[in-house]
Image (cartoon, helix red, strand yellow):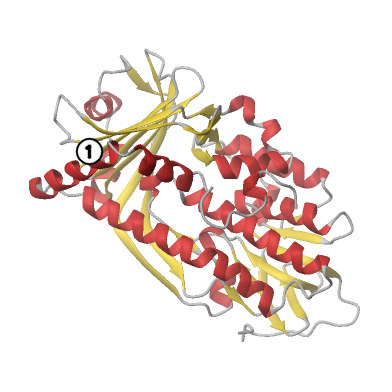
Amino acid sequence: MPHAGAGFAATAAAPRADVAIVGGGLAGLSLALALRQGLGPDADIVLFDPYLSHATVDDGRCSAIAAGARRMLTTLGVWQHVGAKAQPIQAMVVTDSRTKDVARPTFLTFDGDVEPGEAFAHMVPNADLQYALIDAARSAGIDLRAQSVDDFTADRSGVSLSAAGAPTLRAQLLVACDGAKSRIRGMAGIANVAWGYGQSGITFAVEHERPHEGRAEEHFLPPGPFAILPLPGNRSSIVWTERTEDAERIVGLPSIVFQEELEQRFGHRLGWVKPVTKPRAYPLGFAMARSFIGERLALVGDAAHLIHPIAGQGLNMGLRDVAALAEAVTDAARVGLDFAGPAVLERYQRWRRFDTLAMGVATDGLNRLFSNRSDALRAVRDLGLGLVDRMPRLKGLFIRDAAGLTGQVPKLLRGEAL
């Protein structure tokens, strides 16, 4: 439905664009580049984000970029600038234990290749990827505007956007990439189903004595998963899930006490360990938009869905949105159709909604299954993990699914240009 806000009229003299994107994070910038490739150099693509006027903050956070997303970033000419700073995940092990258990038996292991020599994921510093995307967008002629969109109206022929201190812009398609608290989604009147987990993720980087050899570890503990994700050198990224009240207490502990809490969860396989970036806690929750589309509007990334980080799929789900939307728009434009029309947007929604909902339900269920203190549930889930570990074909399917390479895979995720 069109936004029924304060309203304003676009005049014949209003500047025009083919696509307007709101949100200059990793998904928004990737979409701008994908649309530039698909629609060609003459397409007018405008991206709005007030934070583009600020330097990118390196808070030490890293993301696991799945194989499909890495192929897309390579095809868009971005991975070449961050690959040297990325760490391939060569293997992954899963344990299930209590926090104070000295021994943590491994119940499930994964090899890290989706294809021979191709890791199913790489760990990449968020700041480095953000810088590379911004540079690539500028080089590609994307119109980057450090402004916020204050209002918009949509009708059958286009979208009129009002940005602070700028003339009204008329675009064919509006894409909301403005995060879990999306203002565009709210202005469009699209309902959002959401709940919190009462958990927070504590993230930071550590240095350790011995090399990790590219192995990721996920320790399921009663408060939530404790993930050790390899970074270049003898360093790892930590995603430490705790109940929110405990997480706030933990990040505020004196350094020597925090070190003790860390060592208790980290274990001694990699020798001594010490934090090298400041720990920060982020609340965790689930959210799903009732619709991923509106009139001449598409929601992408966290604006459409937010899932628990237990499987490291949040950013990758957003990049899958990017690949699907860019392909749907490009295919329509090349045969002369209205690329922001209902049929095109419905194709995007059908492509992404079931996959996203399935992943959201899976991560929600995994978190509820493992984040508890029940010995009975622990026995059942450990039996299940052990059975999966003895089924190589099933494990291979899990790896390919996590890599974004199952089902109807968009061209960009296959490494093919639009």
- Left or right: residue 61 compared with residue 70: left
Residue 21 at x, y percent in the picture:
69, 62
Residue 305 location in percent, x, y? 48, 62
Q: Quadrant of the N terminus?
A: bottom right
Outermost residue on the left side: it is 376
How many labels were placed on the picture?
1
Residue 89: percent from the left, percent from the top? 47, 30
167 relative to 302 in the view: left or right: right
Q: Please say whether residue 381 is visible from this viewpoint.
A: yes
- Residue 417 location, x and y as percent? 74, 48
Residue pointed to by mark 1: 386
- 215 left or right of 22 in image: left
Above-or-below relation of 179 to 164: above
Pick whichever, 41 or 13, lies toward us.
Answer: 41
Identify the residue at image location x=77%, y=60%.
46
Secondary structure, mark 1, is helix
Q: Measured along the vertical axis of the image, is residue 25 above or below residue 164?
A: above
Three-letter amino acid code at disc 1? Answer: Gly
What's the residue at 59%, 44% (across, down)? 69
